[in-house]
Image (cartoon, rainbow, N blue to C red):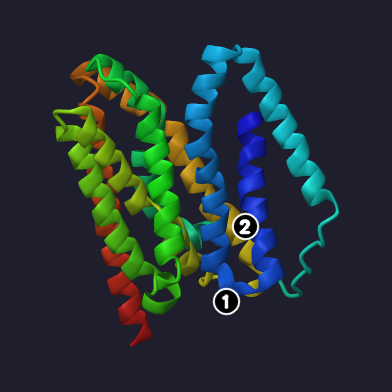
């Protein structure tokens, strides 16, 4: 239930934002949505650890409920996005159009899922302190990249930005895989967050442009499914790899997934160039 609600909140808020400010601002809407989401991750990880240690687990649950209630209150009286007239494509048709872009996102998202799920166990297996700081640096770098470079998508195009970002993310994951010290692991997490930051909006802009305006909400929802799918399969898949080859191997697995997403993005970029000419 929590996962379903979280998924709809994420895709719904993006569609709502695009409807309010126009399709020309799609990249900005997706970027600010991510800043809010991953900013919460950066703050929530160390804050949650402190609350559990100092006040008890129950305080985390109560705090989450209060924050959800505050979010509901803030959105309840906001103006709805106007309904765009026109024929709406069947959802499965929309899903088919955005599928390649969604797969690129899913492959890039495996790195985030691996860090979020296993970084604490990875640090514990190496007897390193401050595992929660990895998530903070990941989230902080993610936000910094979106604030500093979010406008590049409109200037350079989504595919070019995605190619650069997936390259940086792959380097960060490889650094995590090879890191002999916790400091280098922190650097790898920061680099991964910085790289992953613009993958979602970069490929998302290209995906949304494949459908008419009346179906953009469905396109955002279909495209967003892939990050949820990525996070859903990363846990059991990376867990099986860790059980067989050790925790460090999961970062190599995530790096290979990111590199595959990079190759797919290069292919989609070249294909788009051919279609334009």
Q: Is residue 58 above or below residue 276?
A: above
Where residue 89 sits: x, y (%)?
64, 65
Q: Is the residue marked by circle 2 packed among few (<14), some (14-19), or many (20+) residues within 10 Å? A: many
Q: Residue at x 34, y 62 (%)?
A: 162
Does residue 129 appear in this view? yes
The N terminus sits in image quarter: top right
In the displayed orientation, state which residue is furthest to the right.
77
Could you say where residue 53 lies in the image, as x and y percent from the top left?
A: 52, 13
Q: Relative to residue 62, is residue 69 depicted above or below? A: below
Check if mark 1's residue and mark 2's residue have beta carbons within 8 Å: no
Q: Which circle's residue, 1 or 2, is located before the other in the chain? A: 2
Q: Secondary structure at mark 1?
A: helix
Residue 197 as seen in the image, left or right of residue 195: right
Q: Is 242 left or right of 117, judged from the image as shown?
A: left
| Circle number at residue 176 | none
- In the picture, which quadrant includes the C terminus? bottom left
Q: Is residue 174 left or right of residue 158?
A: left
Q: Secondary structure at mark 2?
A: helix
Image x and y of residue 232, in percent: 47, 33
In the rendered image, the vertical position of residue 73 relative to residue 20, given as above or below: above
In the image, residue 261 lies at what x, y percent? 30, 53
Q: Which residue is mark 2?
A: 14
């Amino acid at each position: 239930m929590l996962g379903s609600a979280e998924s709809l909140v994420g895709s719904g808020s993006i569609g709502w934002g695009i409807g309010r400010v126009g399709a020309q601002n799609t990249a900005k809407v997706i970027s600010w949505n991510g800043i809010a989401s991953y900013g919460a991750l950066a703050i929530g990880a160390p804050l949650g650890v402190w609350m559990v240690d100092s006040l008890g687990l129950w305080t985390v649950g109560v705090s989450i409920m209060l924050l959800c209630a505050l979010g509901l209150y803030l959105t309840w009286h906001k103006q709805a996005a106007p309904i765009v007239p026109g024929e709406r494509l069947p959802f499965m048709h929309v899903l088919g159009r955005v599928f390649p872009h969604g797969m690129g996102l899913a492959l890039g998202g495996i790195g985030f899922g691996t860090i979020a799920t296993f970084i604490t166990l990875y640090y514990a297996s190496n007897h390193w302190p401050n595992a929660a700081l990895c998530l903070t640096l990941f989230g902080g770098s993610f936000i910094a990249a979106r604030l500093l470079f979010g406008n590049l998508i409109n200037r350079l195009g989504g595919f070019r930005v995605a190619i650069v970002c997936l390259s940086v993310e792959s380097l960060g994951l490889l650094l995590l895989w090879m890191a002999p010290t916790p400091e280098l692991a922190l650097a790898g997490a920061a680099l991964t967050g910085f790289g992953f930051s613009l993958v979602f909006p970069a490929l998302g802009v290209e995906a949304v442009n494949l459908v008419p305006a009346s179906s953009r909400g469905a396109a955002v929802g279909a495209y967003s499914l892939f990050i949820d799918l990525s996070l859903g399969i990363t846990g059991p898949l990376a867990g099986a790899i860790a059980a067989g080859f050790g925790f460090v191997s999961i970062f190599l697995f995530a790096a290979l997934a990111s590199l595959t997403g990079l190759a797919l993005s290069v292919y989609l970029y070249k294909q788009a160039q051919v279609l334009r000419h």
